Image (cartoon, rainbow, N blue to C red):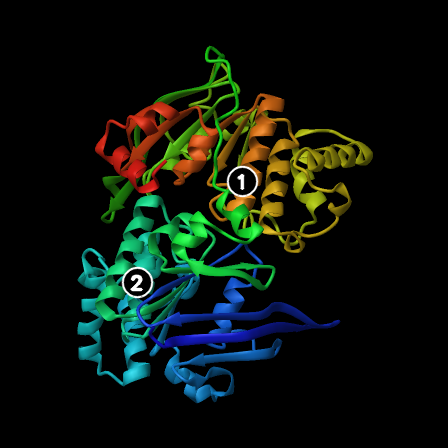
Amino acid sequence: MAKPLLTLENLSVGFQTGGGVSQVTQEVSLSVRRGETLALVGESGSGKSVTANAILRLLPKSSTRYLGGQIRYDGIDMLSCSEREMRGIRGNRIGMIFQEPMMSLNPLHKIGRQLCETLAIHHGTRQRVAEQRALSWLKKVGIRNAEKRMQAYPHELSGGERQRVMIAMALINEPELLIADEPTTALDVSVQAQILELLKDLQQEMGMAMLFITHDLSIVRRIADRVAVMQLGKLVETNTREVIFTNPSDPYTVKLINADPSGLPVPVDAKAAPLFTVEKLRVWFPITGGILKRVKDHIKAVTDVSFVLRRGHSVGLVGESGSGKSTTGMALLKLLSSEGQIEFDGHDISRLSRKQMLPYRSRLQVVFQDPFSALNPRMSVAQIIGEGLKVHKTLSAEEEDAVICQAMREVELDPATRYRFPNEFSGGQRQRIAIARALVLKPEFILLDEPTSSLDRTVQFQVLTLLKKLQQKHGLSYLFISHDLHVVKSLCHYTLVLKGGEVVEQGETRRLFTEPQHAYTQELVNLSSV
C-alpha cells in the first residue's frame, strides 16, 4: 500500500473567545494517499472546512489554537513550519479551490493577470511565458474563447466559468494535492457534472491526490475512493466508498444517506382554479450603442414562456444557470418589465404600474436562495418578520407581536428567539425565518428561488417537509426554481424545463422525469438519476 501523502493524527483545533477557548474539532485522524480521492462529508458546522484550512494554516492566526495532534505532509510537520516555508507549499505543492469563486477571485483584476500572478509568485515566471501557460490552462479546463476570457473580469463570467478559472488557478503549478472545499455547491447539475468530470480527468493526468469536501452524497458516489464522515467536530467513520454506501456502521452516516429528498408532492385537486395564467411571457433586455443610444440588439433572457399554476399546486422551473428561471419568477412578481400576459386570480396584472400592484403585494411573496444575504444583519428576527406587517397591515404592537410569534411557530422556530439577530442562527434556521417573513402576510403564492440549494441534505429535507406541510395547511401555490431534480420531484406537480430562455419541455413532473422527450431534459435526468 502506498505511503500517505497527507496525514492528520488526533488533530484538535479551537478558537479563542472572550470566555476561553472553544474547541471545534476533536482528535481528527485521516490520511490521503497519492493519486486517491478522499471525500470529507458532514453537515455545516461539523468541522470539515476548519480541518481543511488547518492543513494549510489558513485559519485566523490571532484566534486559532492548535490544541493537539499533528499534520504531516510528505514527511513535513506542517504545524512547525515557518510562514516562509508554508508560502512555498501553499498554491505550489498543495492547491485549494474554495466554495464561492466570486469571493476568491479579485474583482479588480482581469482573469489572465490573476493566473499569471500565481506563476510569478511561486516560480518567478516571466510575463510572456506566464501568459502562454495561463492561456493553456484556461483551454485545458474548458473555457471557451480563452483568449478573450484572459481579458475579462470575474463578474463577466458565469458561475461555471468562474469555478473553472479557480480550478486552473489551483492546478497551474501542478500540485501533488488538491483540497476542494464544496467546489460545486452553487452550480446547476449539468455544470456540476462537467466540473466533476474535469477534476477526475486532471487528477488522472497529473497523478494528483484530492481531499474533496462536500455535504452532497451524490457527488461522493461519483468521485470518491474513500469517505470520512464528520459530525460535531469528530470523525465518526472512515471507509471505502462501497462500504460507506452499502454497509455504514455509524447511525449519523445512515442519517446522511437517508436524507436525500424523497416522497411525493402534496395531494391536490387537479381541477383547482388557476391562480396564475402566463401566456407568451417575454423579457428582453435592450443593447444600446452609438451617440444616440439606439437599440442595436437584445439579450433574450426569457422568450414566450406559457404555463398555468393552479391553486394549491407547485410548478417547478428547472434548467442550467442563465436559462431564465429567476428572470421568469421576477417577471411574474412584476419586479422586472416584461411583455406577454400575466393573469393573477382572474386579473390581468401585465400592465399594472408599481402603485397599482401594491394591493397584490401581500398576496405574492418570495423566499430567496441564500438565507445569509437575504436577511438584514442589523435587524432582529422580529423586525425582519414584521417588516411586511408595517407596510400592509394596521396592527397594534401587541397584535403585531402575536402575529410574528404565530408565524415563527408555523415554521417551527421558538418565538422566544425573536429578539436575536440572524448571525445567531444556522443556515436552516435562517431559511425558516425567511419563510416566516413570507408567511406572515398570509399570501396565496410564494416564489421559492433555490431555497434549499445552499443547505445540507438533512436540513434541506427538513425545509422541504416544512414547505409541504405549510402548502397543505394553507393551500399555498408555489413556483419552485431549482437545479436539483430530486427536490423538484419531491415538491412539484408540474415542471417546465428551460434552456436559453425558452421552454424546451413541460408537463406533469413524474411523467417528465420518467419519459423525458427533449434531449436536454434527458441529459438533466440522466445526470441526476432521478
Find residue 146 and report its horizontal and vertical position in percent.
20, 61
Residue identified by numbered label 1: 461
Q: Residue furthest top?
A: 271
- Amino acid at the residue labelled 2: Val
Nearer-the-camera pick, 497 or 519: 519
Q: In the drawing, does residue 244 fall left or right of residue 205?
A: right
Find residue 103 and report its horizontal and vertical position in percent.
44, 62
Residue identified by numbered label 2: 165
Nearer-the-camera pick, 491 or 110: 491
Q: Quadrant of the N terminus?
A: bottom left
In the figure, 521 relative to 154: above or below? above
Report crowding for label 2: few under 14, some 14 to 19, many 20 or more residues within 10 A (C-alpha).
many
Q: Quadrant of the C terminus?
A: top left
Which comes sooner in the sequence, label 1 or label 2? 2
Q: In the drawing, does residue 507 fall left or right of residue 15?
A: left
Report crowding for label 1: few under 14, some 14 to 19, many 20 or more residues within 10 A (C-alpha).
many
- Amino acid at the residue labelled 1: Phe
